[in-house]
Image (cartoon, rainbow, N blue to C red):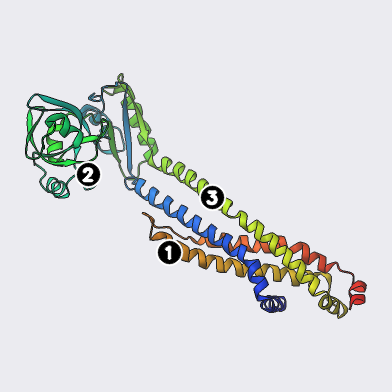
Amino acid sequence: MENLTIALRSIMKNKNRNFLTMLGIIIGIASVIAILAVGDGFTQSITKELGKDNASNKVSLSYATNSSDINSTDGFTQGDAALMSDVDGVQSVKLASYDNTRSVKLSNRGNSAKTYLGPVKKSSDGPKNVVKSLLADKNSYNIIISKSIEKDLFKDESAIGKPVQIGDDMFIVQGVSDSGDDYSTNVLVSKGTYKRIFNANSNKDQAKLTIENGKNKKKVSKAVLKKIKANGEFRHEGSYHIDDPTEAMKSFQKVLNSVTYFVALVAGISLLIAGIGVMNVMYITVSERRNEIGIRRAFGATANNIRNQFLTESIVLCVIGGIIGIILGYLAVLVINAFLPFKAVITIYSILISLLVSSAVGLLFGFIPSNKAAKSSLVGLLKEE
């Protein structure tokens, strides 16, 4: 406590000089806090999104076809679903498609175009009122097409309110979107219409399994994979794989954390420069207080007492700078959050790391000047006095 009191008194005595010395620590710590907060926030938002369907009793199998035909119906069949349901530990099996787009041919008065069709979403491009009506009316035969399709089918005329034939069904164009190219979803229909007309012909390339409570998910999924590889209806036209979102998330988190820590390390280089500044000011402090050191040694202070006194001052200087840096970093994160699509998060470990680093800088760069003060010759000090 005595060393701490002396350190605080000395720091306050030279406020301007010590503040400039702490400035590097403050900037470095604030930068590290902000970068770690953005990295942690981004990681949490992504893993949360990826983990929505990652329940403890859920597992997915995927099918990859060898065919290059986009309209291939290879995949899981109802027979495959029955086979997987028979495996011990499987509670239920649901077949689904990864991709909700279909390759279709549109025609109007002798003009035709081949493109991709999919169900409308809230984020779909197009007139907002039409998107809203398609979302509400699930059996609607109204559609939204892209400008490129409008030009192919109607040339220089407007497509609004005009019929378009897709397969055996007739649809009415109610909206035209600005986006779209040869590889985009250029035709949007209501979800109910898509499911009723087009989804029946979609290949089911995903099998979502629910595992019974108390069963080993990994063991059951391996048993299902083995059985479907041996007996799957389209086993010779493609391959089956287990989709493990847990492992994918772990790998993704490792990559994101590595990038975040690397950027934080680069920002932390300023702490090294700040540490050199701390060492410099401590050398100045030792030189200015040689008289004090001589008097303390004459009254019985040991070399360790002197070393600890100046080392405490160096650490306190850096810790104060670290605390100010943490506060500024927190304020910076509040500002950054106003511009980010996700929320940057300051975690306890980032605060602890910042305090630990600032203390380490004080200890490391304050040791050599403190040691010099401790090893000063008492005779030499008294001669100077």
Q: Is residue 202 visible?
A: yes
Identify the mark at residue 263; answer none if there is no mark. 3
Q: Nearer the viewer, residue 118 or 220?
A: 118
Q: Tell me residue 271's x, y (percent).
A: 63, 58
The residues tagged by marks 1 and 3 sit, at their Cα atoms, a distance apart of 20 Å
Q: Who comes first in sequence, dot 3 or dot 2?
A: 2
Quarter-wise, where is residue 317 in the image?
bottom right
Helix, strand or loop at label 2? It is loop
Q: Vertically, is 210 above or below 326?
A: above
Helix, strand or loop at label 3? It is helix
Which residue carries the number 1 mark? 334
| 275 relative position to 196: left or right | right
Q: Vertically, is 91 above or below 231?
A: below
The crowding category of the residue bearing disc 2, from other C-alpha atoms within 10 Å (few below 14, some 14 to 19, many at least 20), is: many
| 55 relative position to 254: left or right | left
Which residue carries the number 2 mark? 125
Helix, strand or loop at label 1? It is helix
Q: Tell me residue 7's x, y (percent).
A: 70, 75
